[in-house]
Image (cartoon, rainbow, N blue to C red):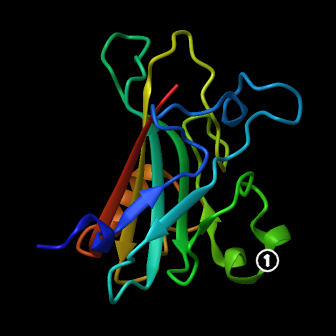
Amino acid sequence: MASDQDQFRLVSPAINQEGKLPRKYTDEGQGAKRKLSPPLEWYNVPEGTRSLALVVEDVDAPDPSGPIVPWTCWVAINIPPTLKGLPEGFSGKEEEVGGDYASIKEGNNDHKVPGWRGPKLPSHGHRFLFRLFALDDELNVGNKVTKEKVLEAMEGHVIGEAELTTKF
């Protein structure tokens, strides 16, 4: 049995013990301290991983027509497994950061724009699910990356999954 220390794990140094997402990662932050993508770190990437894919959703988002429908906040694919995480405010800066980060491709969120789009909520207490997938290949989903295309392209290629849940 693998201990927690050996498991594929996803964490954020910015999220406190209560699991709360700080305001600066949302649309409710102040000035330059808003809409920043949160820093993420991962450990124990499974052997044989060729790329990582990240999907972040507000799992408590109400659809205007009634039911709860997960709202996509961030999609990123072809994250090199050599990286150990993404720095705070990384979204939208792949080329600026350069190096191994330059190959990362950000997909559209449910605001129909690429990159991280933190929540601006009508009510607080929503859960945000960060899922990091270890894949045995890179994904090629064309120029417009969406959560739906990514989930479809990943089928049969997932060799590990790590989750992090936070609240706002």
At x 45% / y 51%, what residue is drawn? Answer: 147
Where residue 135 sits in the image (x, y, percent)? 36, 76
User: Circle 1: is it few (<14), some (14-19), or many (20+) Cα within 10 Å?
Assistant: few
Where residue 84 sits in the image (x, y, percent)? 56, 74
> Position of 37 compared to 19: left or right?
right
> Position of 1 compared to 68: left or right?
left
The residue under label 1 is 98
At x 67% / y 36%, what residue is drawn? Answer: 25
> Position of 37 compared to 137: left or right?
right
Where residue 48 sits in the image (x, y, percent)? 34, 89
Answer above or below: position of 71 versus 152.
above
Answer above or below: position of 4 versus 168.
below
Task: Say which of 90 and 5 sits in front.
Answer: 5
Question: The N terminus lies in which quarter of the figure?
Answer: bottom left
In this view, the residue farthest toward the right is 31
Task: Say which of 37 and 92 sits in front.
Answer: 37
Answer above or below: position of 102 versus 105.
below
In terms of image quadrants, where is residue 93?
bottom right
Task: Say which of 139 and 96 sits in front.
Answer: 96
Q: How many marks?
A: 1
> Position of 36 compared to 168: left or right?
right
In terms of image quadrants, where is residue 35?
top right
At x 69% / y 75%, what residue is drawn? Answer: 101
In this view, the residue farthest toward the bottom is 48
Where residue 110 sits in the image (x, y, percent)? 54, 36
Q: Amino acid at mark 1?
A: Gly
SS of the residue under disc 1: loop
At x 47% / y 37%, what residue is drawn? Answer: 17
